[in-house]
Amino acid sequence: MTQNTETAELRMTRVLPATPEEVFDAYTDAEKQKIWFSILDEQPGVVEIEVDLRVGGRQTAVWGPDRDTLFRETQTFLVIERPHRLVTESVGSGPDGMTMTTTVEVTFDRHEDGTLVTVVQSGFPAVEMRDFFAQEVWVGAFDRIEAYLRREAPRP
């Protein structure tokens, strides 16, 4: 993670066990997202996702343990270079009503063990929020996508 208190930017990487095409599709396809969003949950919750994968299109995700505790994120696609790069403007809100707008760039680079995914997210309102995303949100997302990829496309 990059420590930059002026822009509160984070940078994270993870190698995932699939091709860039497979990882890109898992990350952007609504039906695949519905699976990995809840793949590690003990109890099923609410997961609703719609994706219009085109520049100017939007992805809307609503999720949470129940209808009274929902998170919402709307990402507007700014750059789509399948299967190598995505840039979005993300507007998220939590059950408490707080909202946050950030820019997210995700790259998918071929790696000897699969795909090196790099996330750069900027515009956090506070370092604490950036740290929460670095330690919890993105780690959880990577864990879920990896579990999905291992289940859907087992590697030798």
Image: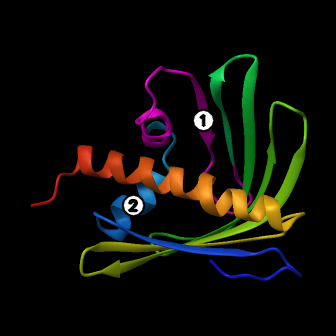
Q: Which residue is mark 1?
A: 49
Residue at the top extreme? Answer: 67
Q: Quadrant of the C terminus?
A: bottom left
What residue is at 41 percent from the left and 35 percent from the top?
39
| Magenta highlight on residue 75 | no
Report the front residue among 57 and 107.
107
Report the front residue among 69 and 60.
69
Give percent across and percent down for residue 126: 88, 64
Q: Quadrant of residue 42?
A: top left
Regarding residue 34, the answer to whether it shows in the image is: yes
Q: Which residue is mark 2?
A: 23
What residue is at 71 percent from the left and 16 percent from the top?
67
Residue range of the region highlighted in magenta in the rendering? 32-58
Report the front residue among 118 and 41.
41
Up the image or down, 29 lies above or below 10; here it is: above
Q: Are marks 2 and 1 in contact (CB under 8 Å)?
A: no
Regarding residue 77, the answer to whether it shows in the image is: no
Coloured how?
rainbow
What residue is at 34 percent from the left and 80 percent from the top?
110
Q: Label 2 amino acid?
A: Val
Give percent across and percent down for residue 29: 48, 47
- Gap in angstroms between the C-alphas marked 2 and 1: 17 Å
Give percent across and percent down for residue 31: 46, 37
| Magenta highlight on residue 39 | yes
Q: Label 1 amino acid?
A: Ile
Instruction: Say few, some or many: other residues with alpha carbon within 10 Å of mark 2 (under 14 / 14 to 19 / 20 or more).
Output: many
User: Left or right: 17 with respect to 97?
Assistant: left
Give percent across and percent down for residue 94: 80, 37
